[in-house]
Image: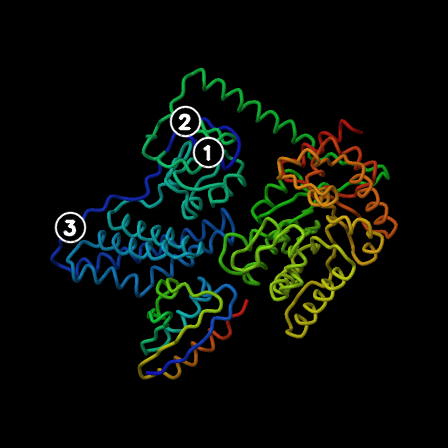
Amino acid sequence: MVEAKIKINSQTGLHARPASLLVKEANKFKSNICLVKHDKEYNAKSIMSVMSMGATFGDEIIIRASGEDENEALNSLKSIIEALKD
Amino acid sequence: MLRGIGASSGVAIGIARVIKKTSEVEKVLIKDTQKEIERLEKAIELAKKEIEDLKVSSKENIGEKGAEIFEAHLMILEDVEFIGAIKEKINTEFINAEYAVKLTSDEFAQIFINMDNDYFKERAADIKDIGNRIINILLGKNNNSMSSIKESCIIVAHDITPSETAQMNKDLVLGMAANLGGKTSHAAILARTLEIPAVLGLGNITEVVKDGDLLILDGDNGLVLINPSQETISVYKEKQEKILLEKRELLKYKDVEIKNKLGRKVEIAANIGNPFEVDIALKYGAEGIGLFRTEFLYMDKTSMPTENEQFEAYKYVLEKMKDRLVIIRTLDIGGDKNLPYLNLEKEMNPFLGLRAIRLCLNKRDIFKTQLRALLRAGLYGNLGIMFPMISSLEELKEAKNILKEVERELEAEGVEYSKDYKVGIMIETPSSAIISDILAKEVDFFSIGTNDLIQYTLAVDRMNQNVSYLYNPNHPAILRLIKTVIDNAHKEGIWVGMCGEMAADVNMLNTLLEFGIDELSVSPPMILKLKKSSGQAS
């Protein structure tokens, strides 16, 4: 299992559009991937789950991946969240 | 009689058509879970097809923006958690697919309702919309109740959702009444755009009114009358006639041209606060958009709008107005309008505090994002950028420098943007009026914001009932300032408009024409009234 901490730098937070980008990317990997906010896990492959996290500007979240392609998954999701800007 | 919120004015008299949305779902215990799951999967596939079709008809009926919502609906239908939870309920509780869908969509909707963010809260309605769609397919019921309307009627519904308005045949809908909704809800904006009366927030009208009841909607007073007497009907018929006649009568003035004392044609433009309203503006013959308030993008939210969200809104209006000038005012927040997510300090004198351009110069990221969106959208029409609340030359220069900086950044990034746009300022502080000769050298136009100009010049808060009698647009100080501004602008060869309430005051029209005003920008329905009264004046 690998994980990384990351800050949401997008002013709009994880709204529908960025969330759907993230979910589409997550679904490309075989690993189980989740996002963690306030110790609660959310399925990164589900738009409903990611949006129900309600991540807004400035929130710190953890990306956690486990499975055969965990490293690729982690790096790719990390770069997507980092690239979120308005 | 029911009392609600008058969300769109006018009178409608017609037969009620009650739109029932939620189907009754019963819990049934089943044995063959595999078969139930197959039923569910088939229903989901059909639901996807329905939504694809809706997307197309929505694009035709309301445009690109209206179709976006269905993109999200499609993703929900493919969601592993959502669909997974439904299947799990069927497998472990041995219940029918309908009931499993209902339980799951209620659960998920509840999660969103509980979130303290309006954007996410609204998503609850989307989830329920989806759930109902699947349930109706499973029950073999028609999902297109709105589209099945074949005769003129008044729509009575629990809530009027985007997926319903997309299918509505607008020529047959005389009016709309709903349990939910208010002045700014989707249904209200749509009703005003289509100019049909609407009364919303009625609470329980779907329980009180039956299909076939005769209804009168009074959109001005927010009333719904159920099976009224013949007498009442004739009173309202008369009222309806009168409104119709007035409208028809006013349309005669659509092509009237108003001239000022210099013999120049005065542009009659529209003030809008939402992209939708551009359609109404055009209908009334707006010759331009004199003030496009951008606050709607920022209000009722918990975070900043993205650059693209803004770009789309500006582009929509610019495209619709073609080569006619669209003046978009940069963010005018602060004073009485606050944004909770900005965490602004509470101020002793908010009207003299960090507001409008001052706030934008203080929070440059926000300002630059808006300017980027504006410059990009400028490619699609005739753009004017207007800064509010300028009170000194330095401030204006700083704002213009940031604009240049944004241009350079876009250039460096290789992003396409407009280089051919106009820059202007609101004249709404006494200081800007007094130094208007200096400011005029820096901009392409002025627009006088009379509401603030009067309040600052006369030192009167017109919301304060103890002093509001002092709020007098005819005060010689105000008239002198306006005259000064117009003269100074003309000396520098730039034009002056007015977008405050005084612009729509037919009693002031002659004075303003006498001063040589070049443009008047008013709310769309006022355009024709203004043109009519000028006819009398000339």
Q: Amino acid at mark 2?
A: Leu
- Label 2: which secondary element: strand
Residue at 38%, 51% in the rendered image: B125
Callout 1 amino acid:
Gly
| Residue linked to disc 2 | B215
Residue found at x 61% / y 56%: B315
For marks 1 and 2, the one nearer the N-term is 1
* Location of residue B312 by image quarter: bottom right
Question: Which tag, 3 or 2, sits closer to the chain's start?
Answer: 3
Position of the N terminus of chain B by quadrant: top left
| Residue B202 spot, x, y in % from top left | 40, 35
Residue at mark 3 to residue at mark 1: CA–CA distance: 39 Å
Decide which of tag 3 and tag 1 comes sooner along the chain.
Answer: 3
Label 1–label 2 contact, CB within 8 A: yes
- Look at mark 1 in the image and give the residue it sits on: B175
Q: Residues within 10 Å of mark 3 (few under 14, many from 20)?
A: few
Quarter in which the C terminus of chain B is drawn: top right
Which type of secondary structure does the marked residue at label 3 adopt?
loop
Q: Is residue B284 left or right of residue B47?
A: right
- Distance of label 1 from label 2 (alpha carbons): 10 Å
Q: Nearer the viewer, residue B6 or B66?
A: B6
